[in-house]
Amino acid sequence: MTDIIRLLPDSVANQIAAGEVVQRPASAVKELLENSIDAGAKEITLNIKDAGRTLIQVIDNGAGMSPADARLCFERHATSKISAASDLFRIITLGFRGEALASIAAIAQVELKSRRDADDLGTQILIEGSVVKSQNAVQCNQGTSISVKNLYFNTPARRNFLKSDPVEIRHIMEEFQRVAMVYPHIAFRMIQNGKTVFQLNPGSLKQRLVQVFGTSLNQKLVTVEESTNIVRINGFIGKPEYARKVRGEQYFFINGRFVRLPFMHHAVESAFTELIQDDSHPIYFLYLDIEPSNIDINIHPTKTEVKLLDEKHIYSILKAAVRRAIGRHNLTPAIDFDLDPIFNVPEPSPGQTINPPVIKVDQDYNPFNTSTIRPPETRFRIKPNTEGWEKYLELPEADPSPSDTQMEIPQHTESNSDSVSDKHILCIMGAFVVTSVRSGLMLIDIKSAIERIHFERFLKNISLGNGTSQQELFPDQIHLSPQNALIVKELLPELKALGYMMEALGELSYVVHGTPSGLENQDIPAQIEALLENYKNLGEMHGNNKNAALALAAAKNSANTLNPRQDEELKALIDSLFACEMPHQSPSGINIIKILNTEEIKELLR
Ligand code: ADP
Ligand code: MG
């Protein structure tokens, strides 16, 4: 018998490692950016084509590499950053396994150009699927430029796994932002398909956050600062009044790396209890510095979870620090004078004529014409499909009188239809509707019901392009972060179909003249921010189905903001629910309806 165990060739080992290190284009972006930072760069440019599929290039003005290092850096476990296992515990640089470049070069065509300040000529290396194709001395700028072309060219299965371009771009932007948010003194630029999407100049941390997330952030932040011997905390929290039902920007960094810290998240949220509604979430950007030996170091380079040895103490320090920051803000809220736009109105120069503001109104609007006004409860008015009801409502003594013309009951109702309008319904805690049906007691989750109803309506509107709008008397201007601006641009036709009447005012601003019927009377910037936040969180889930993701994002928004309490509203809600194609389950997968039959009720009481 011959021996059968063989060592894998390096190229195969590298491809396997690449599976972990380069899960998607954004992971390569992160590794390359971190390398540039480790190399001491003061200016870093990220250049992306086709969501990273065809090109990811990172150009820096850092230390550069010698010709020998330029060749060696693509070897597995080649690193200038550690030399012994013990180094792992005091490492402060970002990457530390010497695996990133080897992994990337295993699954792409890579061109590296690098020159140290002291050298006249730099080095160019072409490497493809771990095979070095050429190495030349070339003229190039000081620093390093790495171009990763055709990622996954030799691992088609992985390439096919990639999500749609917008989703991959969002991941790339997210990684870019997470790095840029930690190094405000470094200039960053991100170019995508030839267009600059971020141009971040060196400045203070607050300036950097505002550059990344949009000018509206400026007025929302309160400084947090705390220094103890187990942790140093600095950064910002959002003022309580800016907390939203949708989770917005919530970032933790430990020693300069983005991390997820569910336990510390809890500390922050609990510092806000009683100041914000239970289902609202504060914004935060918190930077923790902790002695590396107090972190249970997670050696996996792509993981964002870490374990802190002094968790409980850090929890209370953090909570107290946030509490104090809120307290300080509450004592001096008026300090923010200079941020109020009212004080920023420029004085007219002498001789300048001032045009009165023009307000566009709908000339045909007639408040007495019932076809143009919508009473509030019509938010839920979709033609009830009474068939859905029959299953539940055939009460033995039911009187089949489809008399309620207001409910717009369609033709086929001559049978045993039963609108909820003549039933007793109860609203419990603003969250559930209870009513009796033939087989027992029917419970409906209000929030999920709204989500279902609006999801179906919005989806139809987006696909057919016939969403109705509610004109705003005073158009609102919104300012977006570069990331959100990109999403709005990508979604503009769908947003319009949904009923948003909006026009671009430059790259990052829009003027909004109208919002979808059913979402009127809400603060427009907050509404659109929440919509985009929902969309980002859902984009992944819905893969390429943009319409469904947008419809659900908008539906979640309405479920968070609408609060039907009146009998009429609740009845219309139930009717609309049963007019839905899938009344039983919310689009997020939660059961909307539960019927307790006699047996179950008895069981409950036993
Ligand atoms: P690690 O960062 O864990 O050391 P990498 O594979 O990411 O592993 O990089 C290998 C080595 O290549 C680094 O240790 C560094 O010496 C060198 N290197 C990588 N990128 C750059 C860069 N942009 N500028 C200078 N040196 C770099
Ligand atoms: Mg690295």
Image: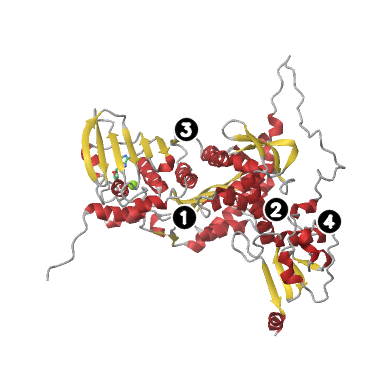
- Residue receiving disc 2: 561
Closer-to-camera residue (395/228): 395
Name which residue type carries label 3.
Lys
Name which residue type carries label 4.
Gln
Pointers 3 and 2 in contact (CB under 8 A)?
no
- Residue receiving disc 1: 229
Return the residue found at the far left. 1
- Lower sequence index among marks 4 and 2: 4
Q: Position of residue 472 (x, y in %)?
A: 74, 38
- Residue receiving disc 4: 406
- Residue receiving disc 3: 195
The N terminus appears in which quarter of the rendering? bottom left
Q: Is residue 82 above or below residue 492?
A: below
For image coordinates 30% across by 41% down, the residue present is 110
Q: CA distance from mark 2 to mark 1?
A: 44 Å
- Lower sequence index among marks 4 and 3: 3
- Lower sequence index among marks 1 and 4: 1
